Image (cartoon, rainbow, N blue to C red):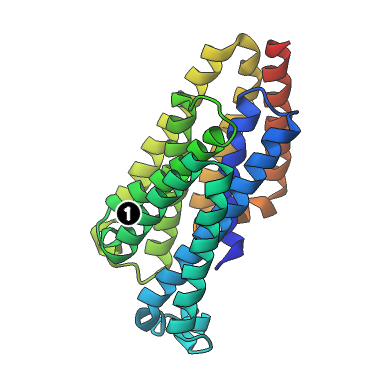
Amino acid sequence: MRPHQWYKNLVIFVAIIFSFNLFSMEMWLHSLIAFAMFCLISGSMYIINDIKDAEKDLLHPTKRFRPIASGTLSSRTALLVSILLLSVTLSTSFFVNRSLVYIELLYIIINLVYTYYLKYFALIDVIIVAVGFVLRAIVGSVVINVPVSPWLVLCVFLMAFVLAFGKRRHELLTASSSRDCLSQYTVKMIEELLNISVSMLLMSYALYSFSVHIFMMITLPFAFYGVFRFVQLVYLKNFGDEAELILKDRTSLANLALWTISVIVALYKVNT
C-alpha cells in the first residue's frame, strides 16, 4: 500500500489554510477524515497496480521484492483486501459527505483506466498524475464546504507537473523503472518540460499572491526558493525518484517552515 507515498494526500489540507479556516476544529476533523479516506484509496490503487505489474516487477532489481511480485502475497488475497478497503472507504465517506464519494469514485475510475491503459502514453501519464493531485485539492475544499479556488486548482496542477517531470528525468537517467512510456521521452524533452512547468507554477503563484493582498508578497521569496531548490537537487543529485526525499533536505525543510509561517501571517493579517 506504500504508506510512504501518502504524503501526496496532504494537498487536502491546503484548502483549510487558504480559506481562512485554519482555527476551525470542525473543519480540521472533516479534512482529517478525507485525508484518511484518500490514504486508504491510494493504498488500494497501489495494490491493484502491483497485481497488474507483478510479472514485470519480477524483472526489476528492487520491485521484484514487493509482496505480490515475490509471491509472499497472492494476487487473489491482495485483490480482496483492495476491494474491502475501497468498500469501507466509500461507505464511510457516504455518511461524511456525499460529494466526497463522487470525487473518490472519479479518482478510482481514472486510476483504473490509467493502470490498465493510459500509463502507456507519454505526457498523458503525467497529466493523469496531475489530475490526481487536483482531485485531492478539490476534496479539501468540498469537505469543508468552501468554494474551489481556480488558483488552487492551477497551482496544484502545475506543482504536480514539476514533481512528475522530475521523477521521469530520474527514471530515464538511471533506468530505474520499466515504465512503458519512457521510450517516448528524451532527457532533453523532460528537462524542457520541467523548466516550462516551473516557470508557469511560479508565475501562477505570484499572480495569486498579488490578487489576494500585498502582504502575500512576503511569501514569494520562500515559494520561489523552495521550487528552485527542488530543481537544483533534481539537476545536481538526480533527485526526482521520490519527491518526499525533499523532507530530508534541511534547507528545504527550513524554507518550508518559513513559507508556511509567512502564508499564515499574511493571510490572517489580511483577514483581520
Which residue is painted at 37% across and 36% down in the image?
196
Q: Is residue 239 visible?
A: no
Give x and y (percent) for residue 40: 56, 60
Badge 1 is on which residue? Answer: 125
Of 120 and 29, the residue lying toward us: 29
Q: The C terminus appears in which quarter of the rendering? A: top right
Give the mark count.
1
Which residue is painted at 53% across and 55% down in the image?
91
Amino acid residing under circle 1: Asp
Q: Report whether 67 appears left or right of 125.
A: right
Give x and y (percent) for residue 157: 42, 38
Answer with the quarter of the image where residue 271 lies: top right
Of 179 and 199, the residue lying toward us: 179
Q: Is residue 2 visible?
A: yes
Q: Report whether 31 appears left or right of 63.
A: right
Q: Secondary structure at mark 1?
A: helix
